[in-house]
Image (spheres, coloured by chain):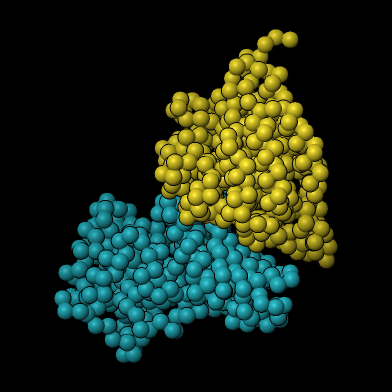
Chain colours: A cyan, B yellow
Amino acid sequence: MSKIKCVLIGSGNIGTDLLYKLKRSDVLDPVWMVGIDPDSEGLARARDMGLKTTAEGVDGVLPHLVADGIQIAFDATSAYVHKENSDKMNAHGVFMVDLTPAAVGPLCVPPVNLDDLSETMNVNMISCAGQATIPIVYGVSRVQGVEYAEIIASLASLSIGPGTRANLDEFTYTTSSAVCEIGGAKKGKALCIINPAEPPMIMRNTIYCLTEGEPDQAKITASLMEMIEKVQQYVPGYRLVNGPVFEGNKVGVFMEVAGLGDYLPTYAGNLDIMTAAAARTAEMYAEKILSGELTLVAEAV
Amino acid sequence: MSKSDLHGRKVICHDMCLRDGMHAKKEQISVEQMRSFAEAMERAGVPMIQVTHGAGLGGNSLQHGFALHSNEEYWDAVAPVLSNTVMSVLLIPGLGTMDELRVAHAHGVGSVHVATHSTEADTSPQHIACGRELGMDTSGFLMMAHLNTASGLAEEAKKMESYGAQTVYVTDSAGYMLPEDVTEYVGALRDTLDDATEIGFHGHNNLGMGIANSIAAVRAGASRIDCSVAGLGAGAGNTPLEAFVAVCDRMGIETGCDMFALMDMAEELVFPMMDHIVRIDRSSLTLGYAGVYSTFLLHANRLGEKYGIPPRDILLELGRKKMIGGQEDMIEDTALSMLKERGDQSAA
């Protein structure tokens, strides 16, 4: 089976972890990695793994996109430069999967809404906390109305890069709005805690939903178990630790996410669930391209 | 008795009973109570008082409890009765946001504690800068200080200073530190920070060290001390303000506060409204002994009762797992996991 060729923009933690996942894909073939620092470890690693690299940013790869048949790009840089990166890729008929919090395109949580997103050239992966918690909120809201959902993400200090640290407000806003928009809650709130414990703690997520009326315990539990299994198909370390706990109208679910340990160690499940969701999303588009169901068109360039 | 070496030192007392005290009241303080407390503290010459949800801006949540009123309602009730006393708030990035700080400022709040865990100062640059841009008196607040080394904490404090913090706090959220620890930590900050940067100390009385620690902090160079009338605060409470002022008076440390007015306030306003007597009991003592975040106290007591596990056992386990402020959800999670383990053991 032929594969769809991809470019990774960003050679940091996320880009590197994603590269390992794409290397295992049956339908995706990572060909280029784009960085901005010629001495970057990420670019050196990519070259060792057989990729072509440029340290001249996105402009360094543009002349090669057509010749190398690139059809999907992943942006793991920052929200500030994403729009420009995306416009340039789209102009060359390259589909964009956005791992920054820019949210230029529609928000995507694969087991919830991946099938509904075909009419776009850009999808956004929200945030690690969004990927880890929205399937649970949706698991409740598809059974019974959710007045309010609150998610608490605890992350190992070593797994949080400088970009996220300096922009925690953005992280909480993006995630809480996605809890409503994709999770189906009427109101949403996201809290984030960075814990420096040694050995590092595995990513934990707690999800609370307040249901409209008394929660239907059996139906909600069954729905949650099904959602968890769906996420486990692409994130094997996604695990229910405790719950669901029902107390009045409150449903509490206590999850942990262990990563595959591709690049960062297993405690960094937050990184893993982002890259795995991005890879899963790109695979669905790749399958559509390969079957002829989707044709990407370049603007006149 | 000889004259204290601290005679003539000036200290700004910052009262916490309308913020940390919210924890001890499960966030259920009325606007009328807020206003009467604020009036009494204005009259007693307390220079600064903190007024928000116990977890600060953005605190209203299932995680931290919903307060009786919004922060805006509290500020609007308190601001009109203050003239010399400055109103402050707590802001923990990841929970509260800069938008909420701008709203607080518009409602008359003049000072902010921007709080991070003791090793994570680099989550605060935007929020500290925002406080300064608004013209607020801006402090960095390094929580659970005992989970960092003295030199490590000084490095984090230096970062906060570089973001614009005018004061940096050594925050003993677990009431774990002993006076010699406070001397070492505050001393490390004093050696590292610019002379113009003030140092603060925020204590909890879980080991009965609130006042001794605060005095040690002053001796090592701190000029701002967080206290709370009658100690109303999380765990075994904060350093009791009226007692701290009494000790300062005896030592000749100048606080500008009226000790008799504060003891009357403690007796007549604060004690009568406590739901439980804020004191060193076996749960709060366990916090101090094991280095656990003071706010976990009432959650552990409630969940201990719900699941039939001694709160002390839950708190010790949370300490072992190195859970930090903001991880209140992990209290129920831990209780549930302990219940499973204990069930497995009794079945075996």
Compared across the picture, whether B235 is left or right of B58 comes to right
Work out whether residue A252 or residue A187 is closer to the camera in this orientation and state it.
A187
Work out whether residue B76 or residue A143 is closer to the camera in this orientation and state it.
B76
Q: Quadrant of residue A32?
A: bottom left
Counting every numbered tag in the picture gives 0
Work out whether residue A261 or residue A228 is closer to the camera in this orientation and state it.
A228
At horizontal 40% and vertical 61% (from top left) the residue drawn is: A14
Q: Quadrant of residue B271?
A: top right
Q: Position of residue B66 (x, y in %)?
A: 66, 59
The quadrant of the image that shows the C terminus of chain B is: bottom right
The quadrant of the image that shows the N terminus of chain B is: top right
At horizontal 54% and vertical 57% (from top left) the residue drawn is: A192
Compared across the picture, whether B304 is left or right of A169 comes to right
Q: Position of residue B152 (x, y in %)?
A: 51, 36
Q: Position of residue B321 (x, y in %)?
A: 65, 51
At horizontal 58% and vertical 42% (from top left) the residue drawn is: B87
At horizontal 46% and vertical 48% (from top left) the residue drawn is: B127
Asked if residue B52 shows in the view, the reply is: no
Q: Position of residue B68 (x, y in %)?
A: 69, 57
Compared across the picture, whether A12 is left or right of A63 comes to right
